[in-house]
Amino acid sequence: MIGIIPARFASTRFPGKPLTLIHGKTMIQRVYNRASQATKLSKVVVATDDQRIYDHVKDFGGEVVMTSTSHPSGTDRCAEALKRCDEHYDLVINIQGDEPYIHPQQIDLLVDCFNNKDASIGTLVKQITDADELQNRNIPKVVRDVSGWALYFSRQPIPYSKAEETISFINKGLYFKHIGIYGYRAEILPVLASLPPGNLEICESLEQLRWIESGYKIMTAVSGHENIAVDTPSDVVLIEQRFKISD
């Protein structure tokens, strides 16, 4: 099993984000170090499109491959990176490069999704316990069936509930948010990367809806860990305040 961390330099809101310092280390190094602590990965590699990121990963002793600058998503970048690997891997874990304090246990939890032989795509979810979080359109929500298969993802609160009943349903554990880490069986990754955007994805701006609309099922596992991503420079201050560690 291989963990691939897509890392591009260009970003509308935060150019050069992978190289920003967080508690004295770059974000990409922190993600790499955390991913390397997962017990169920045999290899971790950064997939980048920028020589500065490539050189930096080499400098701290990490593995890295150069990929195209034209990839529209991390899935596409992972697919190219997998092609460039000499070894054969059955599973690929797409690890977000902007979550410097990702929990290694989450990666292992995602790998366990594939104990189900019918699972070709996996991802993580977390229970929503806050009404403001439920209403936040920047936080994708997901509904699942009783076996853990994702039924739909949306930026809107799903399932719908009357305002006066929402807190009751939150307390009953009905709502889940999506954690943007994916796993794929290696043979399906190039197929997913070749799919054109569907209407659901275009409408919601959620890549995973492309796969669901094309008929692919996504297995989910519930994580208890909170994930905090760095999207803007101001997020660096917030995450340094939240995580009072420097290792």
Image (spheres, rainbow, N blue to C red):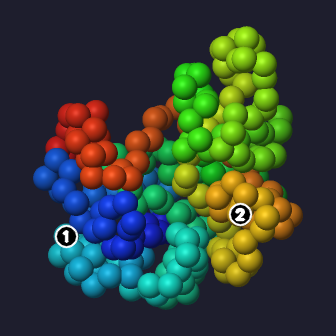
**Mark 2 = which residue?**
202
Q: Residue 19 in the image: x percent, y percent?
A: 24, 65
Mark seen at residue 144: none
Measure the alpha-carbon separation of dots 2 and 1. 38 Å
Between 38 and 128, the one lying in front of the other is 128
Q: In which quarter of the view is residue 55 placed? A: bottom left
Three-letter amino acid code at disc 2? Ile
Q: Residues within 10 Å of mark 2 (few under 14, many from 20)?
A: few
Q: In which quarter of the view is residue 59 placed? A: bottom left
Q: Is mark 2 on a helix, strand or loop?
A: helix
Up-down relation of residue 124 to residue 5 (above or below): above
**Mark 1 = which residue?**
60
Q: Residue 35 in the image: x percent, y percent?
A: 39, 57
Between 114 and 19, the one lying in front of the other is 19
Q: Along the horizontal axis of the image, is 119 left or right of 229?
A: right
Residue at image location 73% in from the left, 72% down from the top? 197
Residue at image location 44% in from the left, 84% down from the top? 69
Q: Residue 247 in the image: x percent, y percent?
A: 19, 46
Up-down relation of residue 77 to residue 135 (above or below): below
* Residue 214 visible to an observer of this rendering: yes
